Amino acid sequence: MHARSKDLAQFFSPRSIAIIGVTRKPGAFGGGTFLEKLLECGFQGNLYPINPKAHEIQGVKAYSSLLALPETPDLAIVSVAAHTVPEALEDCARAGVRHIHILASGFSETRTKEGLELEERIVSVCERNGLLVIGPNCMGPYCPSSSLTAWGAIPGMTGPVGVISQSGAMTQRLTEYLCSLGVGVEKAVSMGNAALLDSTDYLEFMGEDQKIRLIAMYLESVKDGRRLLGLAREIGKEKPIIILKGGESEVGAKTVISHTGSLAGEQRLWEAFFRQTGAVHVRSMNEWVDSILALSQLPAAKGNGVFLVGGGGGNSVASSDTCIREGLDVPLLSGATMEKMREMVPVAGSIAGNPLDTWRTYDDPEYLKRILELGYKDPRVSMVVVDRLIPRAAFHGSGRNHATPEIIEFVKARQQGKPTIFTVDYDGGDPDLTSRGMTLRAELCRAGLPTYPSLGRAARALAHHYRYHARFS
């Protein structure tokens, strides 16, 4: 393991935290709000606000300096004016504190001479004293299993995902989004300018963490491209790495400079990186989450043949086209399957085959289970997509309950060899449809069955899932 990433674990499981620069002014972002959130999320360790002018802040005893503490804290959060950060780091060194998160901003991301020099001083102090630093200009470590959730989904939930990000906002949104769908995060880090510890240090660390089975990354740039390439090649064989790359457009690349003070790099080099490593390349928050759902919850597929189960002739045609565009196949079902299906599907108003067009699948759970069984037994089918509808006034159907728990139990018991996902189309602006569709989607996702609000998003997630496993399985 690379020397700098040997002891990163303490960042994510501190037993005590000192917050340098906690003001008594309520609500101002910084050390005070971090103290507030750590108290709110039930952090079990000791909290030490540092403020030489206060005796108590938010009901917690305050201290004048790190040297006045009754113990050496496992982690220090530095939230002071940028020009005083080097001095705060010297204090950390004198007090024996090695793990430091610099929340403060005003460094290389400003692209000013003063900001660049300050960041150089930070690096110098840390290297001279052997300090490990996350940041500056970042939200730092996040770990629900340690109640270290001062940001992101609060209190969050544990799970198989590790997150490495140059953006605190992107990490916060991702953890909240995943949590709402029942997918937990084991560890996340917002690394900001990454003056010392870079994405490759965290990637190596998370690659060796047995609790993490999938790594999601938001990258605007990388300092050591060769090391990133080598790590991604090796770690990706065991754990999917899903990367949302910021700064791909000319405008985005210019924005990167003002965000974390980094250069985005040439697009053609990143394209080569994805080809050579097999890392999954996504281009939006939704695609990021969709791919995480599929790659964290589904078994590997043996092929790219998809069985589409739903209703509506036009919908079926469009669904086939969408899957084909994403590189999937919608195969003709075998003769034995078609023979049995024709016995089950009425000639009038339905289409037996793949896609399957019969509205009875929406409100007859037993019928749907029999249809799915045909797909699970067909050798040409490797993946299954089941459409669900929210009953509403426009439908000439029973509108009765989907018996969702019954369907969930059946699919979870039968999908091991053939990954199965659901779609619930609730776009269109109808607030009741949207609300009920989101509720059904969350219910299915929390049961471990990836569910998507459109066939397009479902097909892309399955394509990413298939290509990853086809390369590494």
Image (tube, grey):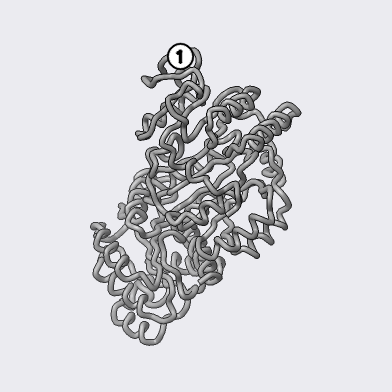
Q: Residue at x 35, y 58 (%)?
A: 448
Q: Where residue 446 sits in the image (x, y, percent)?
A: 34, 53
Q: In the rendered view, would you say 68 is above or below 201?
A: above
Q: Is residue 120 left or right of residue 188?
A: right
Furthest residue toward right: 113
Residue 140: horizontal and vertical position, in percent? 52, 38
Q: Is residue 296 left or right of residue 369?
A: right
- The tally of labels here is 1
Work out whether 50 lies above or below 121.
Answer: above
- Above/below status of 380 relative to 43: below
Q: Where is residue 439 shown, x and y percent of the image?
A: 33, 49
Residue at 47% over, 66% down: 319
Name which residue lies at 33% across and 80% down.
341
Q: Can residue 472 be seen by looking at this rendering? A: yes
The kind of residue on which mark 1 rests is Ala
Secondary structure of residue under mark 1: loop
Q: Quadrant of residue 91?
A: top right
- Residue ID for mark 1: 54
Q: In the image, 354: left or right of 269?
A: left
Q: Nearer the viewer, residue 404 or 198?
A: 198
Between residue 278 and residue 226, name the one nearer to us.
226
Q: Is residue 312 visible?
A: no
Residue in front for this viewpoint, 237 or 318: 237
Q: Quadrant of the N terminus?
A: bottom right
